[in-house]
Image (cartoon, rainbow, N blue to C red):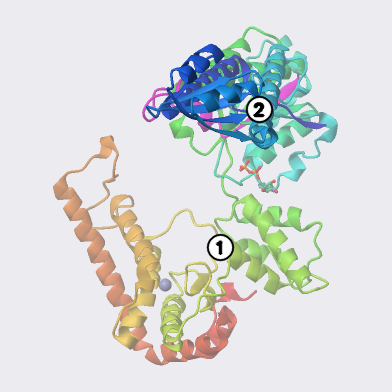
Amino acid sequence: MKRKIGGKNLFKGPKGFIIVAIVFVIFALLATLDDISRGVKKVNYSTFLKMVERGQVKKVKISGQDVYGELKDDSKFETVIAYNPKNWDILKEHDVDFEVTNQSGGFSIWYLLSFLSFLATLGFIWYIFKQAKGGQSGSGGGNNVFSMGKSRHKLFMPTTIKENFDSVAGAAEAKEDLKDVVDFLKSPEKFKRLGAKITRGVLLIGEPGNGKTLLAKAVAGEANCPFFSISGSDFIEVFVGVGASRVRDLFAQARKNAPSIIFIDEIDAVGRTRGSGLGGGHDEREQTLNQLLTEMDGFQTTSESVIVLAATNRPDVLDKALLRPGRFDRRVHVPYPDLVSREQILNVHAKNVKIDMAVDLAKIARGTPGFSGADLANLINEAAINASKTNQKTVTVKDFEEASDKILLGKEIKTMVQTPQDLKITSYHESGHSLIRVMLPQEADPLHKVTIIPRGRALGVSHSLPERDKHTLSKKEMLASIAIALGGRAAEDLVFNKITTGAYSDFKVATDMARDMVCYYGMSDLGIAVYRQGDADFAYSQKTAEKIDEQVNKILDESYNRAKDILQQNRDKLDKLAEALLARETMFAGEVYELLGVEPRIEHKF
Ligand code: ADP
Ligand code: ZN
């Protein structure tokens, strides 16, 4: 069962009445102001007659029983007269210019409008009443879409939860960490009997798409218990107090269905450090957070087995109170998948897709460091879409390549036209990157492929294929990476004697790496001190800053010259590669090695 409770609505609850009242007052004021601004005076019938007799009235317009008139001093008035043609005689006697209009014409438009607005007002009032009733009906109902204090969570009953730990590929550590949560939910009595202190709140920490939601749901699947899911941002509403009552409602329902799991996605939306909001006005969020803390503390004294799992990628911004013992006192990291996990995730998602025999998921896993679980699922899906577009029977290597490029660099921009000269420069630029990679086999990851087909904002791409997920890079490896990053610009410089703006992102990559070497890894003349920017504990002086810049520049200069030297010494290879690339647009590593007559690396033979 999956039901969505509550609807987003501005005019909720008692506050709604205030709003309606304000609206009415505004309308009344506007109507009055309108009359005043038109200078229309409402007079009664006898006054009207007197005015006529005194000869003050210049002209009138009679529409049915309504009279709109103008006095000789140009002021306007309105009145209602008895329908009696005799009246007209008086007007004639006093030489009033009068006009009788067809009553129905004026009537239909004016009165239809006011009738409609009357209906609208009625409907509005009915609507508000209905809401107010919903808001008072307590947590029993849940089907009233107008209820305001009701939680906007989704509830999944155990029979509808298909996920279990097997659905979560890789993530071995996270699964291990969550095992006792499952045990507790399965047989809470066992734990209670032993008097064990049970963690009630677990913080799942990791970048989006790495399976935090999936894991949480898998815990529910494993424990065979109901799963209440809500996003932190769903708590926050326009009106103060709504979020807090939503929290109360959510926890009440979870307790009623215990043992159960509450999953709060993006908890940072409510859980940010209190008082940290910009410009104040964060009462609502703070009240919500306080309520959440109260509910969590309630677990200490109540016996229901409810576990709260919360996801975030910003544990650093969370209010410390949330992390205290008895609240979210456990952290489970859900990192980007490593090589082995990536292959497992690909395998899970490839299950229902017909994949060509030649496709090696292990190889794809190697080519996708930095992909999240969601990216990998998306990769399989995009590849399958590619294949079905061309009515292929199976999903081929090419489909995966295209899908991967698409995910990596955004949609292919077909409209981006390059002149032949642009293409030539791009070709040399990408060849420059690639050639340096090929010429530094010991320090650099092997080449994977190189292309001059523009993708996203990049004009061309030179891909490498990391052999393993490197957590540590040697100084040599970092220097090689910097030289490779600068190789594109070095090639342009060497061949065309000019530099284009296309090298900007390369330059940024190189600079960041050089800076990391100096500031974090102690790979410069400055030694092994850590120079962290924007961190009070590591604040460094202006003088140190200058020294850092000096070192960074030195690394960049040396690397740039090194890149240029390599290209100069291998100019024949550079020309050959650039020409071939211009013709073929995309070349895989094997083709590059063959063309250049370079022995491919052993590791590269797959
Ligand atoms: P998060 O909550 O961390 O943002 P999700 O749990 O919503 O990430 O993951 C999004 C999707 O990515 C999942 O529905 C699933 O298809 C895929 N995915 C992520 N991690 C894994 C994994 N470890 N195994 C299998 N699929 C995964
Ligand atoms: Zn480049």
- In percent of width and height, residue 528 lies at 27, 49
Q: Give amino acid for label 1.
A: Leu
- Please report whichever mark, 2 or 1, sits nearer to the chain's N-terminal start: 2
- In depth, the one of 326 and 395 nearer the eye is 395
Residue marked by disc 2: 64
- In percent of width and height, residue 414 lies at 57, 74
Residue 62: mark in rendering: none
Q: Residue at x 67, y 17 (%)?
A: 249
Q: For numbered disc 1, what is the local secondary structure? A: helix
Outermost residue on the top side: it is: 301
Q: Nearer the viewer, mark 2 or mark 1?
A: 2
Alpha carbon of mark 2 to alpha carbon of mark 1: how far?
Answer: 74 Å
521 relative position to 22: left or right: left
Above or below, 543 relative to 146:
below
Q: Residue at x 56, y 58 (%)?
A: 369
Q: Residue at x 78, y 17 (%)?
A: 141
Start and end of the magenta stretch? 259-283
Q: For numbered disc 2, what is the local secondary structure? A: loop
Above or below, 354 relative to 18:
below
Q: Give amino acid for label 2.
A: Gly
Residue 103 drawn in magenta: no
467 relative position to 396: left or right: left
Residue 408: mark in rendering: 1
Residue 395 in sight in this render:
no
Q: Which residue is drawn at 83% across and 35% down?
A: 160
